[in-house]
Image: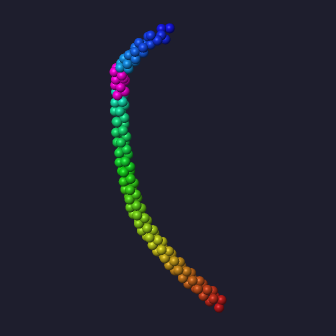
């Protein structure tokens, strides 16, 4: 077999090395730059939407913070309004209760006076009736 002959071994090693050097030069000079260019274009094409997505995310976070601040301000405003309304209506209810209580007290007073008058009238009638009966018996 000719590939195992020692006379051609040195020349075969030389041509194998030359072919590998030539192949390496072609790959590193032609193929790798093409792949590098494709990868760079792909990276730049991906980076633009990623940057926009990051910008949108930061804008969304800013808007969310602003919304939370406005919501907190509205909650405080509503709580203050509720306090004022509660105080106002509690005062109104308290004054209404006082006026109702005064009305009831005056009505009770009038009733007791009426009952007292009727009691006195009944006692007077009773005493007249008893005296009339006592006079009839005599």
Residue appearing at x 37%, y 36% in the figure: 53
Horizontal side of 2 relative to 36 (left or right) equals right
Magenta segment's dominant SS is helix
Q: Is residue 96 visible?
A: no
* Residue 45, position as x, y percentages in the image: 35, 29
Horizontal side of 136 relative to 24 (left or right) equals right
Q: Height in image: 62 above or below 13?
A: below
Q: Is residue 21 visible?
A: yes
Q: Nearer the viewer, residue 68 or 132?
A: 68
- Quarter holding the C terminus is bottom right
Q: Height in image: 44 above or below 7?
A: below
- State the colouring used for the structure image: rainbow
Q: Nearer the viewer, residue 37 or 9?
A: 9
- The quarter holding residue 38 reads top left
Magenta segment includes 36: yes
Q: Nearer the viewer, residue 51 or 112?
A: 51
- Residue furthest to the front in view is 7
Q: Height in image: 13 above or below 38?
A: above
* Residue 82, position as x, y percentages in the image: 40, 58
* Residue 70, position as x, y percentages in the image: 36, 50
Q: Height in image: 84 above or below 74?
A: below
* Residue 137, position as x, y percentages in the image: 65, 89
Q: Which residues are magenta?
A: 28-40
């Amino acid at each position: 077999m000719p590939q195992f002959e020692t006379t051609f071994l040195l020349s075969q090693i030389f041509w194998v090395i030359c072919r590998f050097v030539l192949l390496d030069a072609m790959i590193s000079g032609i193929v790798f730059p093409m792949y590098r260019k494709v990868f760079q274009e792909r990276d730049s094409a991906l980076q633009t939407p990623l940057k926009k997505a990051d910008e949108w995310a930061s804008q969304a976070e800013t808007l969310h913070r602003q919304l939370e601040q406005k919501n907190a301000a509205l909650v405080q405003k509503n709580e203050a309004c509720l306090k004022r309304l509660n105080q106002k209506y509690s005062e109104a209810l308290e004054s209404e209760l006082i006026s109702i209580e005064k009305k009831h007290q005056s009505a009770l007073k009038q009733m007791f006076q009426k009952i007292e008058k009727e009691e006195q009238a009944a006692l007077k009638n009773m005493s007249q009736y008893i005296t009339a009966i006592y006079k009839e018996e005599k």
